[in-house]
């Protein structure tokens, strides 16, 4: 938690410096923020053990930022940050959550209209004051209004990628109690839904009081909504860091203690989804049974309830993976023993989308490769941005050739002959559907990917044409984050997805399941559509730092929710097979 708290502050310092037009420095702060946000070790612990020198060893943390962290550890505040904030008392996190609002806009809006937070912003738009500012138009106001509306719609839900690491921590803490005999997370977290309303935890214990005492005194508890012996409810302060991408968030956690004989049926009930539960209850009724969170009953007699397996079995069904429990046909499939054998978390053999310091990544290729090895991968595809994306330091043909040399060297020197770094590229699909890198250079890569990174607001037909033209390029193998949505921030761009899917099928292109917590694009539904059409997919982390390779888990979860099987996902293949596949 401490890391995320710090990350948030460093990130905001970066923003303030951007407002002041200071070169380079803002990016140093933001890079350090990204690193801290995903760092496994606690920066406070590092400091305790190794002092300032230890902090400086964190990638992206120089002397200056190390001292800033030290100050925060010692005094609980950062003077420099407070001064910046005094000069411009705006709620950065709140305002930047609105799509299209960046540091420059925030500065202008504050100086001219005294806009400090979301409420002020909305007021200014509604009073039509913004269009009168230099450089702003009526259209800007419409866009801002859309952004605010979008934010309101997704309010109260959190990204799985923000919640899950914290839930794991809470579970670990509770497991240390000897009074906890069994523990499971239930609800949407167990189903790995892309956004989460609240967290539901179930515990089996003969001493609920001890468990509840411990639960309500967990670190970061902000509020205790209720405390009882069977159920307690708390609010946990989450420091969303930069992946939170929303207004300062605190989320609720419910904990229920259930008796042993009902543990399975309670887990089944509280895992949901509600629609899945309604459907299972109907099955029970059709068999003359009653199903609820206490068990399965015939008349008043309890038949079973101890485990989920037994509950489903009593209904004549196979046990169903939590990720599938959305009443999307899984009930039928379980009744007829036809559940899909979905891709497993450990089926993944490599990652084909990540960035290095060559473009906007924060780790060197070598560091990325070391982490990939540690994760047990056979290959890692480095896919830096290409030249159209100037702000992200995109590579042109010449730099791609230079990068190839570095990658060849790393492979030649590698001790592990079974592991290979591949060179790809995340190219840009320009307005007319052409690619910003010439075919001669694309041909030299191990594979090329393409995506939409500009002009999101094209009319639907044009956008569809633009994408299909790019898919026709023989060197483009993978279409990345195909719909362009950003959770809690931006809807997919307008396009005819059915048509694009047909083109992907016809030209044998691979669609990406981007595992970034705020992307998860394709989403579960579209994964299912693609799978049913026989389109191959790849699950990629899109890591911009070596620690972000861990995002893979969220992508696999969505693939499972989309019923994707191992054969549908190309990065479950061993290296040789994959390279052959690319050659076709
Ligand atoms: P969330 O928290 O909005 O992300 O979604 P869930 O699925 O975690 O829903 P939540 O926390 O309201 O309730 C947890 C589970 O409890 C839910 O998945 C199914 C069950 N449940 C809750 N309310 C109802 C209900 O009215 N009917 C039925 N059958 N089950 C319910
Ligand atoms: Ca829930
Ligand atoms: Ca709940």
Image: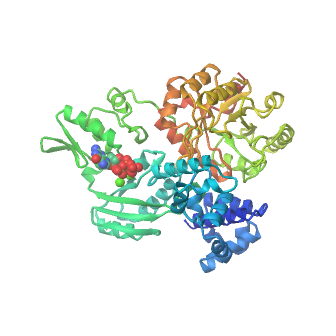
Q: Position of residue 487 (x, y in %)?
A: 53, 46
- 160 relative position to 426: left or right: left
Tell me which image quadrant ligand 3 sits in. Answer: bottom left
* Residue visible at 49% across and 59% down in the picture: 166
What is the basis of the colouring in this image?
Answer: rainbow
Q: Position of residue 233 (x, y in %)?
A: 35, 63
Along the viewing direction, whichever of 94 and 363 lies nearer the viewer: 94
* In the image, farthest residue toward the top: 506
- 476 relative position to 240: left or right: right
* Residue visible at 52% across and 23% down in the picture: 533
* In the image, farthest residue toward the left: 299
Q: Quadrant of the N terminus?
A: bottom right
The quarter of the picture where residue 462 lies is: top right
* Residue visible at 56% across and 54% down in the picture: 128
- 313 relative position to 378: left or right: left
- Image mark count: 0
* In the image, farthest residue toward the bottom: 75
Identify whether 448 is placed above or below 543. Answer: above
Q: Position of residue 385 (x, y in %)?
A: 74, 42
Please indicate, yes or no, whether residue 218 appears anywhere in the rendered image.
no
Q: Quadrant of the C terminus?
A: top right
* Residue visible at 70% across and 63% down in the picture: 19
Please indicate, yes or no, whether residue 428 appears anywhere in the rendered image.
yes
Q: Position of residue 109 (x, y in %)?
A: 63, 61
Along the viewing direction, whichever of 521 and 446 lies nearer the viewer: 521
């Amino acid at each position: 938690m401490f890391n995320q708290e710090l990350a948030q502050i460093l990130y905001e310092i970066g923003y303030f410096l951007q407002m002041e037009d200071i070169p380079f420095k803002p990016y140093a702060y933001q890079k350090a923020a990204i690193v801290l946000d995903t760092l496994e070790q606690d920066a406070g612990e590092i400091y305790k053990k190794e002092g300032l020198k230890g902090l400086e060893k964190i990638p992206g943390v120089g002397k200056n930022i190390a001292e800033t962290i030290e100050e925060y550890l010692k005094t609980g505040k950062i003077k420099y940050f407070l001064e910046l904030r005094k000069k411009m008392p705006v709620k950065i996190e709140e305002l930047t959550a609105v799509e299209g609002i960046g540091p420059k806009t925030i500065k202008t809006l504050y100086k001219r209209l005294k806009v400090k937070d979301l409420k002020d912003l909305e007021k200014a738009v509604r009073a039509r004051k913004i269009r009168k500012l230099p450089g702003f138009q009526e259209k800007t106001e419409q866009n801002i209004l859309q952004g605010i509306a979008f934010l309101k719609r997704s309010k109260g839900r959190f990204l799985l990628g923000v919640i899950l690491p914290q839930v794991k921590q809470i579970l670990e803490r509770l497991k240390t109690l000897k009074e906890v005999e069994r523990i499971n997370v239930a609800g949407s977290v167990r189903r790995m839904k892309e956004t989460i309303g609240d967290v539901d935890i179930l515990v089996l214990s003969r001493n609920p009081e001890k468990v509840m005492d411990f639960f309500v005194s967990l670190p970061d508890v902000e509020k205790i909504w209720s405390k009882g012996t069977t159920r307690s409810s708390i609010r946990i302060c989450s420091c969303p860091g930069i992946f939170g991408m929303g207004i300062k968030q605190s989320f609720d956690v419910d904990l229920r203690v259930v008796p042993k004989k009902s543990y399975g049926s309670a887990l089944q009930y509280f895992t949901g989804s509600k629609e899945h539960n309604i459907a299972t209850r109907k099955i029970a009724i059709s068999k003359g049974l009653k199903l609820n969170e206490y068990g399965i009953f015939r008349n008043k007699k309890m038949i079973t309830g101890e485990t989920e397996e037994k509950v489903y079995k009593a209904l004549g069904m196979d046990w169903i993976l939590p990720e599938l429990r959305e009443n999307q046909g899984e009930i039928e499939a379980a009744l007829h023993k036809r559940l899909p054998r979905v891709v497993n978390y450990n089926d993944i053999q490599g990652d084909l989308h990540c960035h290095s310091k060559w473009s906007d990544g924060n780790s060197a290729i070598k560091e990325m490769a070391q982490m990939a090895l540690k994760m047990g991968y056979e290959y890692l595809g480095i896919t830096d941005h290409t030249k159209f994306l100037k702000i992200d330091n995109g590579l042109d043909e010449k730099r791609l050739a230079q990068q190839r040399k570095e990658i060849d060297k790393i492979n030649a020197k590698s001790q592990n002959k079974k592991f290979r770094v591949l060179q790809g590229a995340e190219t840009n699909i320009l307005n007319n559907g052409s690619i910003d890198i010439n075919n001669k250079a694309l041909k030299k890569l191990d594979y090329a990917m393409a995506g939409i990174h500009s002009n999101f607001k094209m009319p639907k037909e044009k956008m569809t044409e633009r994408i299909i033209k790019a898919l026709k390029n023989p060197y483009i193998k993978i279409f990345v984050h195909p719909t362009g949505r950003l959770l809690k921030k931006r809807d997919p761009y307008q396009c005819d997805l059915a048509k694009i899917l047909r083109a992907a099928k016809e030209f044998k292109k691979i669609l990406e399941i981007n595992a970034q917590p705020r992307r998860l694009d394709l989403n579960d539904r579209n994964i299912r559509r693609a799978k049913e059409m026989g389109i191959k997919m790849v699950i990629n982390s899109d890591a911009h730092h070596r620690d972000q390779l861990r995002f893979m888990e969220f992508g696999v979860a969505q693939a499972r929710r989309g019923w994707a099987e191992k054969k549908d996902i190309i990065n479950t293949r061993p290296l040789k097979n994959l390279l052959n596949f690319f050659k076709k």
